[in-house]
Image (cartoon, rainbow, N blue to C red):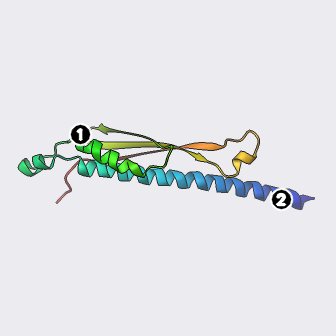
Amino acid sequence: MLMPAAILVMVVLAAITVDRAVVFGAQRDLVTTAQVIADNGASLGVDIDHLRSDGQIEVDHEAIADAVDDASVVLDPGTSFTWFLQGDEVVVELQREVPLVFSPGVPGAPHAEQVTARASAELRLSDP
């Protein structure tokens, strides 16, 4: 009689493990995507003419907006996307709902989980 109960416990633990792996994988993917978008905005958001003339970094807001918008085309459908400048950093925040695999089969359990990611990239010259 203990064997069927032990098997049931193992199946439930395996289902929880799979659902957690799906959420962690989606979050890792979202963090990577947010970092790529932030890096793209920071690298292309510097006014090149101003940098070449006096060696100082000046932020080009329009270039950052264009670079971030161009990079955001890789986002999965349903991903909410915001970005802003915080000092000399481009900050990107992403949020997406990830459907779970086994939890929807359990009455009262959630069918999806919200995953968020935030990444930033600094606008600065590299050290010589």
Disc number lying in front (2 or 1): 1
Residue 46: x, y in percent? 20, 47
The image quadrant that residue 114 belongs to is top right
* Relative horizontal placement of residue 117, taking residue 37 as reference (left or right): right
* Disc 1 element: helix
* Relative horizontal placement of residue 65, taking residue 92 as reference (left or right): left
Three-letter residue code for mark 2? Ala
Q: Write the residue at 20% across / 42% down.
A: 60
Residue 57: x, y in percent? 16, 46
Considering depth in this image, is 105 or 120 the residue closer to the camera?
105
Residue located beneath label 1 in the image: 61
Three-letter residue code for mark 1? His
Considering depth in this image, is 72 or 116 the residue closer to the camera?
72
Q: Write the residue at 47% across / 50% down.
A: 30
* Marked residue nearer the N-terminal end (2 or 1): 2
Q: Write the residue at 79% across / 55% down.
A: 9
Q: Is residue 100 above or below residue 14?
A: above
- In the rendered image, the residue lying farthest to the right is 1
Local crowd size for mark 2, using a 10 Å CA cut-off: few (<14), some (14–19), many (≥20) = few
* Disc 2 element: helix
Residue located beneath label 2 in the image: 6
